[in-house]
Image (tube, rainbow, N blue to C red):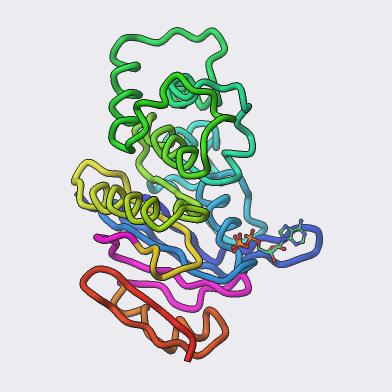
């Protein structure tokens, strides 16, 4: 059955007198794969923080799996959301062992602190590391990993608790061309999987939209410029307004490119 996993209505966020988001209406259904596109400072990370229940909006409503955040305990809803991005990477101790980092996501922890795990938990953690191409790193310390390796490990971690919604903040940033293409292929495979959670990927670049993604939300200055099926929102007009410059946008199969004109 199709149902909404995330719904924001009139969401506004303010911090230290600055308006970070304003009047955001956004619904993510369980079979949708969204990319959130916008320039630096547009409010993308803030939007994900609200979706991940880490930031409470000053205005408007947020529902996760049809439960209002006003009524539910965020601690009960948090395991339903997998989140990977630099905000998580910055909190991981350099000394955390990769396998421990992934497996401890079942308890919402960033490493093992004496909790008990069963054989199937280790099996799942290793299967996820393998799915993201980093099983050989299972015994390494997080602090010794490259940027690309960290990103893959954190995506595996975000999937460990079998979330209903997976939020990835700039998964392709800082990767070389081969690393980016490999990551996009793996994200495309996840997008195609019927068992995958609803997906939301944040990016600055239309070239980083993974194959199989269905919807786009364009944001600038904390306001939604456009949101809906990709073919409807990926226009030169809407993207030009979002990034503040005239653009030539092209689609080649399920990939996109954009350049200034
Ligand atoms: N405490 C704060 N006080 C004032 N402004 C803030 C505060 N925290 C964040 N901002 C501003 O809110 C805006 C949105 O920030 P956010 O990190 O959500 O943007 P973003 O789209 O993820 O940007 P980037 O692509 O550069 O990561 C930015 O202009 C940022 O400077």
Instruction: Check residue 228 for magenta coloring.
Output: yes
Instruction: Check residue 221 for magenta coloring.
Output: yes
Q: Which region of the structure is painted magenta?
A: 210-229
Please tell me in which quarter of the rendered image ligand 1 is found: bottom right
Of 79 and 92, the residue lying toward us: 92
Residue that appears at 49% across and 38% down: 150
- Residue 114: where, in percent of width, then height? 54, 7
Horizontal relation, residue 112 to residue 18: left or right: left
In this view, 22 is above or below 170: below
Horizontal relation, residue 12 to residue 250: left or right: right
Of 119 and 75, the residue lying toward us: 119
- Residue 180: where, in percent of width, then height? 39, 55
Horizontal relation, residue 18 to residue 168: left or right: right
Provide the major secondary structure of the magenta segment.
Answer: strand
Q: Which image quadrant is residue 17 in?
A: bottom right
Residue that appears at 60% across and 31% down: 92
Of 148 and 39, the residue lying toward us: 148
- Residue 206: where, in percent of width, then height? 41, 70
In this view, 170 is above or below 240: above
Q: Which image quadrant is residue 93 in?
A: top right
Horizontal relation, residue 204 to residue 41: left or right: left
């Amino acid at each position: 059955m199709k149902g909404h996993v995330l719904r924001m209505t009139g969401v506004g966020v303010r911090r230290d007198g600055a308006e970070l988001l304003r009047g955001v209406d956004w619904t993510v259904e369980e079979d949708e794969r969204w990319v959130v596109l916008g320039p630096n400072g547009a409010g993308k990370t803030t939007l994900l923080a609200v979706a991940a229940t880490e930031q409470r909006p000053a205005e408007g409503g947020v529902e996760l799996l049809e439960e209002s955040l006003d009524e539910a305990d965020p601690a009960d809803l948090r395991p339903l959301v997998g989140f990977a991005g630099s905000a998580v990477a910055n909190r991981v101790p350099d000394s955390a062992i990769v396998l421990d980092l992934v497996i401890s996501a079942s308890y919402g922890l960033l490493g093992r602190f004496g909790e008990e795990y069963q054989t199937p938990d280790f099996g799942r953690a290793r299967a996820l590391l393998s799915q993201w191409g980093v099983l050989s790193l299972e015994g390494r310390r997080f602090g010794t990993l490259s940027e690309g390796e960290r990103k893959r490990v954190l995506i595996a971690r975000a999937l460990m608790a079998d979330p209903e919604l997976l939020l990835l903040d700039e998964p392709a940033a800082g990767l070389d061309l081969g690393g980016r293409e490999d990551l996009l292929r793996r994200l495309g495979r996840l997008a195609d999987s019927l068992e995958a959670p609803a997906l939301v990927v944040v990016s600055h670049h239309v070239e980083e939209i993974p194959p199989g993604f269905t919807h786009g939300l364009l944001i600038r200055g904390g306001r939604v410029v456009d949101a809906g099926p990709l073919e409807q929102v990926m226009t030169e007009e809407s993207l030009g307004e979002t990034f503040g410059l005239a653009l030539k946008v092209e689609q080649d199969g399920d990939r996109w490119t954009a350049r200034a004109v």
